[in-house]
Image (spheres, grey):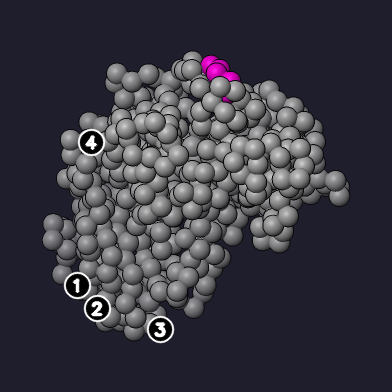
Amino acid sequence: MFRIERPLGLALMIAMTAAPAAGQSAKDAPITIAVDIAAAGPKIDRNLFGQFAEHLGTGIYGGVWVGRDSSIPNVRGIRKDVVAALKAIKVPNVRWPGGCFADEYHWRDGIGPAKNRGVSINSNWGGAIEPNSFGTDEFFDFIDQIGSEAYVSVNVGSGTVKEAADWMAYMTADAKTTAGKERAANGHPAPYKVKYLGLGNETWGCGGSYTGAEYVALMRPFARFVRNYNPAQTGEETMQRIAVGPDGKGTDYTEAVMKAQKEHNWAWNIEGLSLHSYTTAGWPPAYASENFDEAAYATLVKAALNMEDLVKTHAAIMDKYDPGKKVPLVVDEWGVWLKPTAGTDPGFLQQQNSLRDAIIAAIHLNGFARHADRVKMSNIAQMINVLQAMILTDKDKMILTPTYHLFKMYVPFQDATFVPAKFNAGTYTHAGATLPRVDAIAARDTAGKMWLTVTNVDPNRPVRIDARFAGLTVRGARGEVLTAPRFDSVNSFAAPDAVSPKPFVGTPSRGGVTLDVPAKSVVVVQIDE
Ligand code: AHR
């Protein structure tokens, strides 16, 4: 409940004498956030802000790919509006082609001239026809256009080691080889860079229902033989192999994979362990994505807090096998999973995205940042039109969701240095759910500037924050606030800017800064030193 138990003494007493924020009850004392600027923490890896794009519903077809002949403005078939929007949030990596889809994906169906593309059925997601018009070369074109890295998941579930190895050769081998020649004939002589390689997906579920030990035996030959031949991928650029890890419940995979990694011989290794967990509060997902009440708001925000507990649990197991923290935890599927939008194909997992979801995203990102020594990458599910999306499209129209705006506000935290902040979060209680009222993280960006983000979870009470930076001369704070009239406010095609960031200014106060943070909002400010 409380981030710290230690009273903050003088700083808190000074803060308590300040006048309350507009709308704040006189009995609400300000919350003091003490930022320990002398205690620099780990780097908040920019990959924590990664995306996931599966062949699912209109996530790819319609969302990214419209085809070269479309009247929707595109570059080589890829939507221009979507590319521009994604560039603005500096997407560090995109996980593709799935998800469950990846375990039935056969890469050869998706290369070469249109007439050679295999047409199949997307058995996981609504039985949709998969035209394979968006395949390997289109994916690399897309990530090149948005300036992102590739996180490719190979088919471990229904494919073979040879199929995956051949795919990797197609992507990365020299153009003098047979595989490289084929790529060159398809328009790309230079090897692609595959920075991250997923060795299967949810092998405890849709990926084959294996135990942790069974998965280790299955995965090892993939880790050994799916070789990256790109000569430029050495040192920092070396490909990282990410093994399947736990779901939100058991620890079998974490134990089995980390034990195997500790005992690995020269012939194989992994450089990451995946974790998947969605915010649902029950299964199947029954909570609405719009027009919901405060009980639904409180329940799902509370459910989102589970992620940081999961990270702690699995990080502790990983520490046992890997005390040097060489193997990162990669949360490559997370987000709010809600009831599908009425009138849409339930297999397309389409849902609206409200202010609540942006608050939930902030809670996740803050939790990952607090464990940035172990969590080096995360991928929100999913980028466009699916689950907790950044972007919704409808034919030629596109809107940016509250979660998109949150990701944009957090751009300064990419590769920033985490700076510990202590605060008493207070509580927000509704319908039997009690949760911390406030969350916050601080960091120094790559240019040395100090940033602070504060989330006020309470939908009814604004909060005055008294932010202290011992040793800094603070002149003020400027940034943005994301809020809306209601916690279930959404952006729609009719009202695309109902939830969008507005300028926000803090006021200097005795060596610190006062931030009047509205109810149900996220504030991100740069501290003027
Ligand atoms: O993101 C939707 C699905 O959720 C993914 O395909 C799967 O990996 C997970 O269960």
Measuring from the top left, give residue 76's x and y in whole percent: 45, 39
Magenta span of residues:
117-121
- Mark sitting earlier along the chain (4/2): 4
How far separated are the C-alphas under marks 4 and 1?
Answer: 39 Å
Instruction: Calculate the distance from the C-alpha at mark 3 to the C-alpha at mark 1.
Output: 21 Å
Q: Residue furthest left?
A: 22
Q: Do the residues labelled 4 and 3 touch (CB within 8 Å)?
A: no
Q: Is mark 4 within 8 Å of ligand 1?
A: no
Q: Circle 2 is placed at which residue position?
A: 509
In front: mark 4 or mark 1? 4
Type of amino acid at the residue the image marks with label 3: Gly
Q: Residue 471 carries which label?
A: 3
Q: Where is residue 171 in the image (x, y as percent from the top left)?
A: 66, 42
Q: Quick one: label 2 or label 3, which is nearer the N terminus?
A: 3
Question: Tag 1 or tag 4, which sits nearer the N-term?
Answer: 1
Q: Which mark is residue 492?
A: 4
